[in-house]
Amino acid sequence: MRPNLLILGGTTEGRALSAALAEAGVPGTVSMAGRVARPLEQNLPLRIGGFGGVAGLVRYLKDHAITHVIDATHPFAAQMSRNAVAACAETGVPLLAYTRTPWQAQPEDDWSHVPDLAGAVAALDGPSKRVFLAVGRMHLEEFTAQPQHAYVLRLVDAPRTALGFPEATVVVDRGPFTLEGDRALLRDHDIELVVSKNAGGKGAEAKIIAARELGVPVLMIDRPAIPPRTEAHSVDEVMRWLAHGFADLGV
Ligand code: 3Y8
Ligand code: NAP
């Protein structure tokens, strides 16, 4: 049976993996949800849009004779990851998650942890501060419950509607971000608190390192729970897993 991969992408890791697979001549497709206006080109064919829940993903795996699924989605894309676990269990298609370990606080960090986005909103109770809200667009509205702060918001696309914050500066930019850029952002906006998801990896880490250097506290949102699955943390690990899988296919 000819290998045919489905990579659930949308991350730095997903793009790096698709480059390695293209280089190795391994057939595959990268899938994205279609969250942003102009997703980066990947080195493999790209499909955009939801599958239609677990049933839709099962149908996609069967219709496209997918032999392996690599879940390289972001640690906060928990619903996609849950669906991948369920669909691969139902179809028997081998699943590997290519993910990154959470950031760990260093001695000089000033982090406070909250379990989820709602916890981050609640933790913003209190007097007005200059807050860098680096959580993207999809959950911004929840933070309008704390209108007293002066927010700096970083978004991939310019907002199409009013955001509902009395005082907010929008920075339209997509990562991976640089330490110089994020150090300047924290300084230029005189940021007193950074709100961040514990994304892990390098693409979003600059703001965490800049906060450490400048002594700015971080409100760190811990990751959502994802069902157990086999995990890899490097392209090499993924390629070794695939080599075993292809041997099982007799290729
Ligand atoms: C559409 C695909 C690559 C991938 C780059 C990574 C790194 C840069 C840092 C900050 C934090 C945030 C956000 C972020 C980063 C990488 C990676 C990552 C965080 C693109 C992309 C898609 C998305 C979706 C987008 C979300 C948003 C989250 C912005 C492509 C650029 C905040 C996550 O406007 C929206 O609807 C944005 C939605 C999901 C979270 C949210 O809740 O708003 N990512 N980001 C994917 C799809 O359609 O399936 O355009 O290329 C990818 C990347 N964004 O190729 O190097 O790997 O994490 N993405 C977070 O970490 O908190 C920004 O500003 O400091
Ligand atoms: P999510 O909440 O886990 O998923 C919600 C639904 O979106 C899924 O059930 C699925 O719809 C669809 N979906 C999600 N990822 C998809 C993909 N790669 N391909 C096809 N459909 C997908 O996902 P999310 O947090 O919105 O993340 C969406 C995308 O942005 C993912 O590619 C993720 O890697 C990327 N991203 C997210 C974050 C973040 O902070 N959440 C950060 C960086 C990148 P159906 O049920 O219809 O199949």
Image: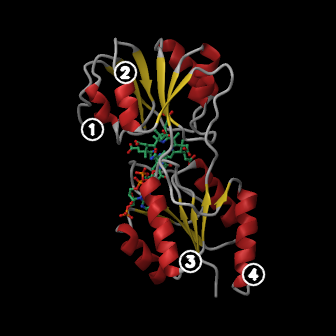
Q: Which amino acid does label 4 sit on?
A: Ala
Identity of the residue drawn at 73% across and 65% down:
239
Q: Is mark 3 on a helix, strand or loop?
A: loop
Cα gap from disc 4 to disc 3, whole angstroms: 15 Å
Crowd class of label 2 (few under 14; some 14 to 19; many from 20; radius 10 Å): many
Residue at 54% across / 38% down in the picture?
198
- Mark 2 / mark 1, whichever is N-terminal: 2
Mark 1 or mark 3: name the one nearer the start of the chain. 3
Residue at mark 4: 247
Q: What element carries label 2?
A: strand
Residue 159 at x, y percent in the picture: 31, 36
| Residue 224 drawn at (x, y percent) | 47, 47
Separation (CA) of disc 2 from disc 1: 18 Å
The answer to whether residue 32 shows anywhere in this view is no
Residue to which mark 3 is pinned: 93
Residue 109, quarter of the rendered image: top right
Amino acid at dot 1: Arg
Q: Position of residue 184 (x, y in %)?
A: 56, 18
